[in-house]
Amino acid sequence: MKAALGWPALVAPAMLFLLVVFVVPIVMVLALSFSGPQIGLQHYARIATTPVYVRVFGNTLQIALGVTLASLVLAYPLAYLLSTLGARTSIILLGLVILPWFTSLLVRSFAWMVLLGQNGVINRGLLSLGIIDKPLPLLYSAFGVYVGMVHILLPYMVLALYSVMRGIDRDLLRAAQSAGAPPWRAFLHVYLPLSLPGVAAGSLLVFVMATGFYVTPALLGGPRQTMIAQLITSEINEAVNWEFGAALATVLLLVTLLGLTAFNRLLGMDRLLTRDA
Amino acid sequence: MRGASLRLEGVRKAFGSVTAVDGVTLNVERGTFLTLLGSSGSGKTTMLMLLAGFLMPDSGTILVDGEPITFRPPYKRNFGVVFQNYALFPHMRVAANVGFPLRMQGLPPDTIRRKVETALELVKLAGHGARFPRQLSGGQQQRVALARAIVADQPVLLMDEPLSALDKQLREHMQLEVKNIQRRLGVTVVYVTHDQTEALVMSDRVAVLREGRLEQVGSPRDLYDHPANRYVAEFIGESNFLDGTVREITAGECRVDCAGLLVIGVCPPGIRVGQRLSVAVRPERLRLQSEALLANRVSATIDEAIYVGDAIKYRVRVMNGPVLTMKAGRGGAGDDLKPGQPVTVGWTQEDVMFVEAP
């Protein structure tokens, strides 16, 4: 009885907060994108018919997907290792994984500039060792953007995978092995499917965050790696075209939702739970 | 018979400075139900893991039908393993769980389906193949795990406290059922438990383990009636222990002086006059003196009566002597004794077990 009366009161502050800082602004942005000089779809028409915007959306999706995939490939073995270690060791190592979060994203992107530049540590090292005879285009390239973004987003993937892997009963692998499955088949038939919720959660998180990245591609990427957040910023800050910026943001939101749906189709919990034998 | 024989030869396994299994040699005959019985830390689970191939011994050999398999990986042993927490694959339906070993062998789907059906029928779960494990009760999950461990005609079945998570009634029911299935299939079972009742009910042979060593291997009756030492006598069943010295041996009868109380028993071989030892008498062997035939008789008073349903346990204080536990069946003369009541209790020579002094 008490709980039934109490829960709206408990939820209310958070709901109010979300309403004011999240729902209202989004609705306003959405409304703004249909206005401008006159009410209509003219901003969306401009996005669809201007090659540069279509290309930047393509870039954004491609980079976000690439970063998600690279994070997954790097994080999976690491999270697996962490989940098999004793509680104390795994907590220390997890601390190391999260450590980069204590420095700001901006600082870390600048640090990568120092490392990856024409005269950066890596190029000069390789040059002086005679492995290369002219500097590699590490900075202001797709490579730089991927390195920078994966570095920032990897911990999210590791944590999402770790939390699921930690809950997988190790006896299941033993059961699979005693049932005649060599380790790789035990992994494929038992561990991998059971770790999929973590893969889905981590991938969603990283993908959604990657689509909105601004600082890292701006600092580490070239013109070909321009992402949509950079265009939105320049529309609003430089062109002072709020309506068009709002339309770009709305399309970004739609693209992200589309990505979410696709991920859910591929890896979602519902599929996992009703999987046929 | 489909079972295989197992043999451990001088098997040793240490974890750091702790020796979990300390030079165990043990034979398990084809088609036998053998239980590894011990308290926690006795090394029984380690032994099972060594048999399953999840652990490798530091020294010693494990043989199946005379063939060494000491370092063979688990997936090449074709042993059925039933885990304490069932270890069913939560993302697979019951049929896929049971059929997993067959799928790993690459059998055609039709054969798999047929064999899975047979196995599910055997564990009385026919028609449950399309469910997921989480939709089943604990007892049903245990049956699925059992079906998975026998579906591929595994000659050896290893079980690690498989019934410990079930409630008492279900556990007792499953004990008989597991035993039945084992007998029907003729499979060799190595069963780990800390529950002595379970061991006595299910096993053909019981191996009592303590700190990585075998204390005694024998049939349940052997262990209960002729415990090899004090540890086994204490671990299996209840006993009244009296420490004493052998005073006299005549015509196969020993007279042991236990602090003034003279106990007469059938003398086992190798006992000498003057030897210090313990005699043990099971509580249910103590009876109220109504027949004059009992060789051992003492006057005592009832200290305490404990009602346990199918029997009554009495704490009986012997005049100037120890307190003994007596277990009296219902309906007899000992049904309703009151504390303070004087009684005469007795036991026969055959009821006396001799074990070494502590």
Image (cartoon, coloured by chain):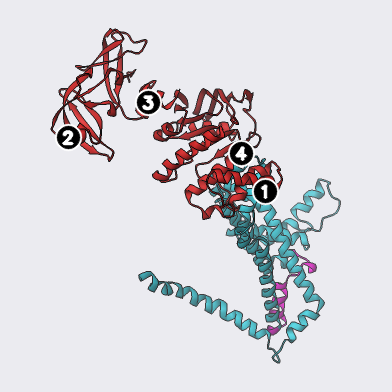
Instruction: Say which chain tag 3 marks.
Output: B
Residue type for callout 2: Leu
Is residue A245 highlighted in magenta?
no
Residue type for callout 3: Tyr
Give the residue at x 74% y 87%.
Answer: A42
Q: For mark 1, does the 10 Å Cα neighbourhood hold few (<14), some (14 to 19), or many (20 or more) residues?
A: few
Query: Residue A14's x, y, as percent?
Result: 48, 73
Q: Which residue is mark 3?
A: B224
Q: Which residue is mark 4?
A: A178
Taking B84 as reference, is A39 left or right? right
How many numbered discs? 4
Q: Is residue B329 above or below residue B122?
A: above
Q: Earlier in the sequence, mark 1 or mark 4?
A: 4
Instruction: Say which chain tag 1 marks.
Output: A
At mark 3, the secondary structure is: helix
Cα separation between marks 2 and 3? 28 Å
Chain in cyan, by letter, is A
Frontmost residue, B63 versus B154: B154
Taking A26 as reference, is B297 left or right? left
Is residue A240 highlighted in magenta?
yes
Labels 2 and 1 in the same subunit = no
Query: Residue A128's x, y, as percent?
Result: 81, 47
At mark 4, the secondary structure is: helix
Q: Is residue A89 above or below residue B205?
A: below
